[in-house]
């Protein structure tokens, strides 16, 4: 029986923080919110999390922040076609790869153990729940909006008054999507490295 929903907002690298949130479904209360950095921290969390078999988990897809030569390649990366004819298109250093493969092996291993785990894209999920703002994504104004909306619209009264890190707020969005998956209100939009990406 599923008793908890877990959201993990994965950073693109060890220097960028990741956030994790766990909500008890019966009470609707957030029981754990924390920051993680390295993949060892993420692996340690899952190894020590006692309700793993009784949880539904959503892990975000981090952007691939690989350094590229030429500013135009960096700025145009999100707008490139995902599949193209290799003969007509130069993809040197894999610069059209949108999402990072960080942690894919760990999450596939969890799936093979029978854990209910899916991936999600933060921006699309925020749109699904009407949690997008007119501010620049991940700016302080955007984070304040997201935190206020989560408290007022979705009843996360445990969130503090002061500003939370954006990774933790995105993890809470993952918790919401995990609970929607339990209600069969999601669909798989594509597959990334063996795991379904849901919306």
Image (tube, rainbow, N blue to C red):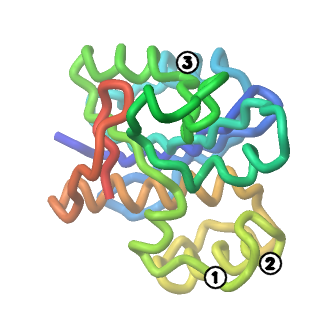
Spot occupied by residue 20 in the image (x, y as percentages of width and height):
58, 43
Comparing 100 with 72, the one in front is: 72
Callout 3: 10 Å neighbours few (<14), some, many (20+)? some
> Secondary structure beneath disc 2?
helix
SS of the residue under disc 3: helix
Local crowd at mark 1 within 10 Å, few (<14), some, or many (≥20)? some
Residue to which mark 1 is pinned: 133
User: In front: mark 3 or mark 1?
Assistant: 1
- At a point 64% along the width and 47% down the height, the residue shown is 77
Per the image, label 1 sits on a secondary structure element best described as loop
Nearer the N terminus, badge 1 or badge 2? 1
Q: Is residue 1 left or right of residue 12?
A: left
Q: CA distance from mark 3 to mark 2?
A: 32 Å
Label 3 vs label 1: CA separation?
33 Å
- Pointer 2 residue: 141
Residue at position x 46%, y 81% from top? Answer: 130
Image depth: mark 3 or mark 2 in front: 2
| Quarter containing the N terminus | top left
Specify the label residue 43 is tagged with: 3
Q: Residue at x 74, y 53 (%)?
A: 75
Q: Residue at x 60, y 38 (%)?
A: 10
Residue 152 lies, with reference to residue 86, above or below; the image says below
Q: Is residue 185 above or below residue 9?
A: below
Quarter holding residue 117? top left
Q: Is residue 145 left or right of residue 7?
A: right
Residue density around tag 2, few if under 14, some if 14–19, many if 20 or more, within 10 Å: some
């Amino acid at each position: 029986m599923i008793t908890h929903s877990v959201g993990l907002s994965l950073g693109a690298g060890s220097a960028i923080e990741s956030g994790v949130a766990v909500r008890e479904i019966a009470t609707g209360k957030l029981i754990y919110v924390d920051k993680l950095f390295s993949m060892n921290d993420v692996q340690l969390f899952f190894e020590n999390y006692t309700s793993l078999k009784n949880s539904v988990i959503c892990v975000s897809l981090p952007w691939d922040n690989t350094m590229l030569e030429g500013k135009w390649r960096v700025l145009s990366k999100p707008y490139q076609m995902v599949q193209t004819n290799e003969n007509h298109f130069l993809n040197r250093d894999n610069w059209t790869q949108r999402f990072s493969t960080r942690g894919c092996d760990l999450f596939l291993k969890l799936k093979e153990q029978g854990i209910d785990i899916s991936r999600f894209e933060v921006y699309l999920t925020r749109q699904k729940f009407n949690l997008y703002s007119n501010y620049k994504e991940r700016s302080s104004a955007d984070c304040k909006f997201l935190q206020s909306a989560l408290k007022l619209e979705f009843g996360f009264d445990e969130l503090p008054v002061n500003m939370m890190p954006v990774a933790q707020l995105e993890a809470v969005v993952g918790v919401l999507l995990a609970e929607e998956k339990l209600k069969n209100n999601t669909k798989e939009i594509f597959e990334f490295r063996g795991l379904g990406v849901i919306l």
